[in-house]
Amino acid sequence: MADKTSKDKQDPNRKGGGFAPFFCNLFGTLLIIAVFALTLPLTAPRLMGYQVYEVVSGSMEPTIPLGSAVYVQEATPDDIEIDDIIAFNDGESIVTHRVVANRTTSGEFVTKGDANENEDISPVPYDALIGRVERTVPVVGQFMALYVSNVGKVYLLLTAACGIMLNILADRMRAQRSQRIRQQLAGGVAATDADEDAVETVDERTRQRRRRRAKLRTALMVILAIIFLGSGGTVAYVLHEYSVSDQKYEAASSTYTRAKEDEEPDPTYAPITVDFESMRAVNEDVVGWIYCADTPIDYPVLHGETNKQYLRTDYTREYNLNGSIFVDCDNRPGFVDANTIIYGHHMNQGAMFATLENWGEQSYYEEHPVMWLLTPEQDYQVVLVSGHHVSAYSDMYDIYAEHDESFQHYLDEAIEMSDFVPGEGADVNPNRNYVMLTTCAYVFDNARYVLHGKLVPVDSAGGVPLS
């Protein structure tokens, strides 16, 4: 018996039936734990009445670091005290700043970011209050896209299904091993001490219970297998579509554009040429080409009859998961409005306008302060003046045809909210035309990131000198 006990201590997987089920249990459990670890801090608080937001600026550092998740509980103005950190809707996005004064007579709070030298320019009306920030957790906010985006949800579902299946598979392997050992013993085949210990005498009721459990495990395995295959198939399809789309747009860039690598850089001309004649023979809705050096932004720009037309359709009018970069259907042709809105998807692989949020960092802006918009009639430098988050229902999506006083107010708001400080040459001229590039963001529900750029005409069209 001493030898047997010693052997049991050295073999921690004896009851598990070997290394394979032990590994399946371990890996499956780790996958399930990973899913819970990623989702619980973001989803469970919502069930408890909290709103969860990601911090995307450093205005509250070091109290609330960039990338943190903030947990906001609903509160009334009477509940708020001086020095409380509140979340409020400023009309364009969700802001979390500290209360420095409460003007009860006018029904508004005066707020300030801990990292800012001055108080916020505009006071916060009571009706803009969302609630008080009760908790903050660093880094966690960066994972919000996992449950906000559809692709992120599929990845989580796939991971959870895989973890559960591995655990069920481990139980199945153990049951099969026990059955095999019982058969060996019934046939008079010698078994090891470990095998004998793994076999228990069971009565008929126990056997029936085990059979029912086996059937439930089998049914659950089938269901999970369907979920796993469906999720895996969805992921595979999406990745395939990403690859096809990327290849198609790379081919478009190779076919219709040419970089002026052999020429000296000249800010009065666009750095690439575009064969608009050939492109418009394919699709007359092509109105331009947007380009930013050393970034993925290098795409044709479309202008359709509706904003859904090119949402999942490329410049050849074929279905494409990436869709197209396209101008708001309510804008007039030729970028003649005071502001023109240009939409692009936020693709997980970094394509289309996924990189717009990078301009939230001052260093990235300083490396890429200018884009190019080429058209068949006139090329423009797009001098970036502001970048910030907004709600999809923000007034920033209003279109201004004329350069009037309301448009000046629009520009003032954009500059006030900017994540970066514009550099030399990026002064705001209300008599210029502007574009607003926009894409999805995942810092709160229906969030968007936008870049405002001043259109500065240059002496070329399609990259070819005008004179």
Image (cartoon, helix red, strand yellow):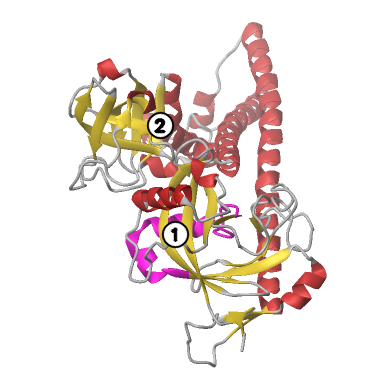
Could you tell me the amino acid type at mark 2? Val
Magenta run includes residue 59: no
Residue 361's mark?
none
Q: Is residue 2 visible?
A: no
Binning the other alpha carbons within 10 Å of mark 2 as few (below 14), some (14 to 19) or many (20 upward) gives many
Q: Which residue is mark 1?
A: 430
Q: Secondary structure at mark 2?
A: strand
**Which part of the image, by quadrant, shows the N terminus?**
top left
Magenta run includes residue 358: yes
Q: Residue at x 46, y 43 (%)?
A: 390
Of the pair 194 and 382, the residue shown nearer to us: 382
Image coordinates for residue 158, horizontal then vertical, percent: 60, 39
Of mark 1 and mark 2, the one earlier in the sequence is 2
Q: Which residues are magenta?
A: 342-370
Q: Secondary structure at mark 1?
A: loop
Residue 52's mark?
2
Q: Residue at x 63, y 69 (%)?
A: 289
- Whether the residues at callouts 1 and 2 have beta carbons within 8 Å, the answer is no
Task: Give the Cα distance between marks 1 and 2.
Answer: 37 Å
Does 451 sit left or right of 373 as displayed? Answer: left
Could you tell me the amino acid type at mark 1? Pro
